[in-house]
């Protein structure tokens, strides 16, 4: 039960984490819709973008043009009812449920952003295979030191909004707990075709991690800066270090307009990060030793502007490892995160979580193919750098000492036209 005496911000986050009808009515009681209406979606749904992942134009940006992700997010991992491929009735149900969300909320951070994605296990229900150029292997461990639970549910529905009450209401609309959403009648209930196997929640943005740091994984010293959007104390997702939506979009075949999505959940244990390391050492391990030496990062790093500047520090990675006894997280990952023409390959959209009162990170990453994600993640492992005795597999090796991968799942995000239980080879 949510304590109604919680301060308002903490209250709304607690409401999303808890979920359920009680949470929503409590939430609306605190922030009545009448006083703060939510914009509804268009009557003509063909005006919506074909890309389900077209979020960047529909969220806030900071003064440098970096996108700021919606503050409240929910991931619903779904299992299709029954064996084998879905029936037409199930497809219509899913289509109707998603249309309800489209109509009920303007597609942006003040309304709702949402997308549904399907796993390799879902496509295996069919006799037909996905087109050969769809790069969607099953999830697997990506380092020698992790044993994640592999998420092989059929589908993943991702809901995101700056409004906690919207995320909750949308969830209730798709799970059959309400008959209208933002004044729009619910056309069909997603859970008439699918079952929620796992519900995961999160948040991102200045103030929220600091407010929520009283959880396992964060030391008692209350170290998370108020300004930080993430528990680790830095800003992430600079425009120059992110792939564009265009770049990650599949450009041909039946799923043109779609993309692939890897989602991991990463537990954080930040006691030594904060209590044993200086700010300078944290900068070295998060960005690069060169960033610390040149004093490039002020506070959470907002001063970096629209680019972390990491490309300056890729050639001297080995020399700096010897000189400073540390290598940077961004520095290692960036080595594999450019194509031959210098384009960034991954579009990261990670957000924090306090599910089960544990500090963790939900890490969705969009890319044209899952292989790109796997290559970048392996570069981040930095196994090749452990020739240097100061750099061990998980010590002085970026942030690996503090993060633990608990889950991994891979999904195809179809274009909107094929978002309702697609076959492996949908026709127009
Ligand atoms: C708790 C976990 C993590 C935190 C707090 C974190 C934070 C950061 C920060 C602050 C940066 C530098 C700013 C930026 O470019 O966005 C960064 C860069 C990056 N991180 Fe992470 N990260 C985490 C986990 C991961 C994971 C699991 C991956 C998986 C591959 C990853 C991949 C990257 C990449 C590709 C870059 C950009 C490097 C480039 O410029 O190409 N990060 N991260």
Image (cartoon, grey):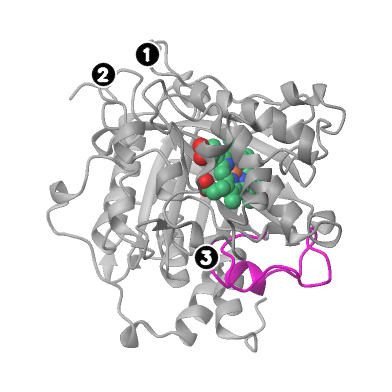
In the drawing, does residue 320 fall left or right of residue 236? right
Secondary structure, mark 3, is loop
Residue 131 in the image: x percent, y percent?
35, 13
Q: Quadrant of the C terminus?
A: top left
* Circle 3 residue: 205
Query: Is residue 196 or residue 389 the one in the foreground?
Result: 389
Residue 94 in view (yes/no): yes
Q: Quadrant of the N terminus?
A: bottom right
Measured Cα–Cα span from mark 1 to mark 3: 36 Å
Residue stretch in magenta: 204-231
Q: Earlier in the sequence, mark 2 or mark 1?
A: 1
Residue at 53%, 24% in the rendered image: 121
Which quarter of the frame holds ligand 1?
top right
The answer to whether mark 2 and mark 1 are in CB contact below 8 A is yes
Q: Which residue is mark 1?
A: 133
Look at the image and tell me whether residue 199 can be seen. Answer: no
Q: Judge whether residue 55 is colored magenta.
A: no
User: Label 2 to label 1, Cα distance in Å?
Assistant: 8 Å
The residue lying toward the viewer, choosing from 179 and 42, is 42
Q: Is residue 287 above or below residue 270?
A: above
Relative height, residue 425 to residue 269 (above, below) = above
Front one among 61 and 44: 61
Residue 253, label in figure: 2
Packing grade of label 3 (10 A; few <14, some 14-19, many >=20) is many
Question: How many residues crowd mark 2 within 10 Å: few (<14), some (14–19), many (20+)?
Answer: some
Q: Earlier in the sequence, mark 2 or mark 3?
A: 3
Tell me the residue at 45%/81% (across/down).
28
Q: What secondary structure is marked by label 1?
A: loop
Say what secondary structure mark 2 lies in.
loop
| Overall secondary structure of the magenta section | loop
């Amino acid at each position: 039960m949510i304590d109604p005496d919680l301060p308002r911000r903490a209250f709304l986050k607690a409401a999303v984490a808890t979920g359920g009808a009680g949470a929503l009515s409590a939430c609306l009681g605190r922030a009545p819709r009448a006083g703060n209406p939510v914009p509804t979606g268009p009557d003509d749904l063909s005006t919506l973008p074909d890309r389900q992942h077209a979020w960047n134009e529909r969220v806030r940006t900071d003064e440098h043009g970096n996108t700021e992700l919606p503050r409240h997010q929910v991931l619903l991992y779904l299992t299709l009812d029954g064996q084998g491929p879905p029936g037409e009735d199930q497809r219509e149900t899913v289509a109707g449920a998603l249309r309800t969300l489209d109509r009920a909320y303007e597609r942006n951070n003040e309304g709702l952003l949402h997308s549904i994605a399907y796993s390799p296990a879902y496509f295996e229900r069919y006799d037909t295979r996905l087109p050969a150029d769809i790069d969607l292997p099953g999830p697997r461990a990506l380092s020698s030191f992790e044993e994640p639970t592999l998420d092989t549910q059929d589908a993943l529905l991702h809901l995101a909004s700056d409004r906690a009450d919207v995320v909750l209401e949308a969830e209730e609309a798709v799970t059959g707990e309400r008959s209208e959403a933002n004044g729009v009648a619910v056309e069909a209930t997603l859970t008439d075709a699918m079952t929620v196997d796992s519900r995961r929640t999160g948040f991102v943005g200045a103030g929220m991690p600091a407010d929520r740091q009283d959880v396992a994984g964060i030391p008692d010293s209350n170290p998370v800066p108020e300004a930080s959007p993430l528990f680790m104390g830095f800003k992430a997702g600079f425009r120059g270090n992110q792939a564009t939506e265009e770049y990650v979009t599949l450009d041909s075949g039946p799923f043109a307009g779609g993309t692939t999505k890897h989602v991991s959940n990463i537990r954080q244990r930040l006691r030594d990060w904060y209590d044993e390391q200086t700010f300078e050492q944290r900068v070295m391990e998060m960005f690069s030793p060169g960033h610390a030496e040149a004093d490039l990062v002020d506070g959470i790093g907002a001063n970096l502007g629209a680019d972390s500047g990491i490309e300056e520090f890729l050639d001297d990675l080995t020399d700096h490892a010897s000189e400073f006894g540390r290598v940077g997280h961004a520095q290692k990952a960036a080595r594999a995160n450019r194509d031959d023409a210098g384009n960034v390959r991954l579009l990261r959209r990670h957000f924090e979580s306090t599910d089960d009162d544990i500090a963790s990170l939900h890490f969705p990453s969009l890319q044209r193919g899952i292989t790109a994600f796997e290559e970048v993640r392996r570069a981040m492992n930095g196994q090749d750098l452990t020739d240097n005795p100061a750099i061990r597999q998980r010590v002085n090796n970026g942030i690996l000492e503090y993060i633990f991968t608990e889950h991994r799942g891979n999904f195809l995000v179809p274009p909107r036209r094929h978002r309702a239980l697609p076959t492996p080879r949908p026709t127009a």
